[in-house]
Image (cartoon, rainbow, N blue to C red):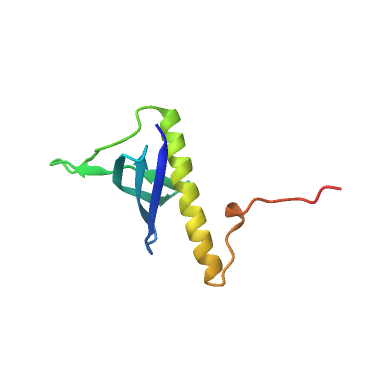
């Protein structure tokens, strides 16, 4: 299963950073994914539904760690590219975490 499209809609909020939709194999879409800024940095929150008892239950989610890591890497990469490009277009510089550090080789 391959992620063939990622659409990121940035949000100007302290914790919620973006809404995301992803397409698998050009034939199945998952929407309402969120990028959240938590205590340990950015993470991907899968779409969920609030239960009667006030807790949340994921509606769609990866079944194994390999797929979860693939999904998070792909989504956060697109988010960083999009937000970094927006910062450069606005005259700001992206943070060091978004730029690879290169040292000249002699």
Q: Is residue 16 visible?
A: no
Query: What residue sits 51% from the left and 55% below the top?
Result: 81
Viewed as shown, does residue 30 lie left or right of 82? left
Where residue 99 sits, quadrant-wise, is: bottom right
Residue found at the far right of this picture: 106
Position in image of residue 20 (x %, y %)? 35, 51
Residue found at the far top of this picture: 64
Query: What residue sits 32% from the left and 35% below the top?
Result: 61
Most foreground residue, 17 or 71: 71
Q: Is residue 66 visible?
A: yes
Position in image of residue 92 (x %, y %)? 56, 69
Where residue 14 sits, quadrant-wise, is: bottom left
Location of residue 84 with respect to 24 vertically, above or below = below
Residue found at the far bottom of this picture: 91
Q: How many marks?
A: 0
Most foreground residue, 100 or 53: 100
Location of residue 16 with respect to 76 vertically, above or below = below
Position in image of residue 95 (x %, y %)? 58, 59
Position in image of residue 34 (x %, y %)? 35, 49
Query: What residue sits 42% from the left and 45% below the top?
Result: 43
Query: What residue sits 45% from the left and 29% below the top?
Result: 66
Location of residue 37 with respect to 53 vertically, above or below = below
Name the image quarter holding the N terminus: top left
């Amino acid at each position: 299963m391959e992620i063939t499209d990622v659409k990121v809609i940035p949000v100007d909020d302290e914790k919620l950073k973006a809404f995301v939709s992803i397409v698998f194999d050009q034939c199945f879409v998952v929407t309402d994914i969120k990028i959240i800024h938590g205590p340990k940095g950015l993470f991907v929150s899968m779409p969920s539904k609030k239960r009667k008892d006030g807790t949340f239950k994921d509606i769609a989610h990866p079944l194994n760690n390999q797929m979860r890591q693939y999904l998070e890497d792909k989504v956060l990469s697109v988010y960083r590219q999009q937000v970094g490009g927006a910062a450069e277009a606005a005259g700001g510089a992206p943070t060091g975490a978004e730029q690879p550090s290169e040292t000249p080789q002699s």
